[in-house]
Image (cartoon, helix red, strand yellow):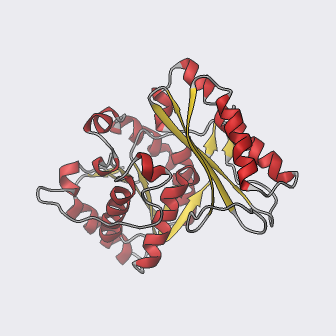
Amino acid sequence: MQIVTRASQLRSLAARLAAEGKTIGLVPTMGALHEGQLHMVREAQRLTDAVIVAIFVNPLQFNTQEEYEAYPRDLARDADLLMPLGVKYVFAPSAEELFPPGFATWVEVKVRDQELEGAARPDHFRGAATVLTIYFNLIQPRFVFMGQKDAQQTVVAKKMTRDLHAPVEIIVTPTIREADGVALSSRNEFLSSGERQAAQVMPRALQLAEKLFTEGERSAAKIMKAMRKVIEQEPLAQLDYVAATDTEHLEPLDDMSGRATLISLAVYFGKTRLIDNVILHDEKFKPKAGIKLG
């Protein structure tokens, strides 16, 4: 496995792979890898000739320096997880490498970027869009693999690639869940045992949305009201938001008939904020909620 830390080295590597006629797949992560991200890597390995996994804790995506510094980092552990999957290339730069002194360029995608997740993390999406653009310029991947759990981020990435005519296809992989339904997240390790138990209220609320939809309910307001009641019954849970939007522009929906609807929610457990979602659609009549482990 080759761990690349310099942008110039990465550009040279990507150019060599392209000259060899290899299709490049990028898996952008912030490390602290879990099975959800490893699933993305496996999909990348299946669909491309050369996979580059980016492991970079992006300071532009955090509200405070304290939150940024507290984010888990263990490159050796992450490399050990990637090695058995056959990953040959990891990009693990420093913040100074990607954002040197005087860095003053941002990429902003105005798709409800100050609402939903953007309300809690005002600069998060322009930080994500900016670092993705840097990756695209350095690597020129054909495919980029992202997870459905970060639904709003995938919408932002798709919109950015369309608007900037980037020759990149965003592949969205299913949310991977623990056996109890809780979505895998690097933030789960910040939960106490009681909070981790309480986090099961999130998949329960989403499962209720699926049940009501399957039984014929198409009023987003009624489904969200039922979900709020479920969350409110858990003393350790503090609801941030629940939303029903379309899947392309994140516009609010009320009548869910005949179109794909993203039901998303964010919940605090102590100081830890978790997100999750499900996609409901008449045509398939089966929710896209993810894959359970075990």
Q: Does residue 271 lie above or below 208 as drawn?
A: above
Dividing the image into 4 quarters, which one contains the C terminus? top right
Q: Residue at x 64, y 37 (%)?
A: 202
Outermost residue toward the bottom?
A: 165
Of 232 and 293, which appears nearest the observer?
232
- Residue 255 appears in which quarter of the rendering? bottom right
Q: Report the side of 139 relative to 99 (left or right).
A: right
Q: Residue at x 32, y 36 (%)?
A: 67
Of 267 and 226, which appears nearest the observer?
226
Q: Where does residue 183 sit, x and y in percent of width and height?
A: 60, 40
Q: Does residue 151 lie above or below 30 as drawn?
A: below
Outermost residue toward the left?
A: 101
Residue 167, visible in the rendered structure? no
Label total for image = 0
Q: Where does residue 59 sit, x and y in percent of width and height?
A: 28, 47
Q: Report the side of 233 relative to 122 (left or right).
A: right
Q: Report the side of 274 relative to 70 (left or right).
A: right
Q: Where does residue 189 sit, x and y in percent of width and height?
A: 47, 28
- Residue 271 appears in which quarter of the rendering? top left
Outermost residue toward the right?
A: 215
Residue 153, visible in the rendered structure? yes
Q: Where does residue 124 sit, x and y in percent of width and height?
A: 37, 52
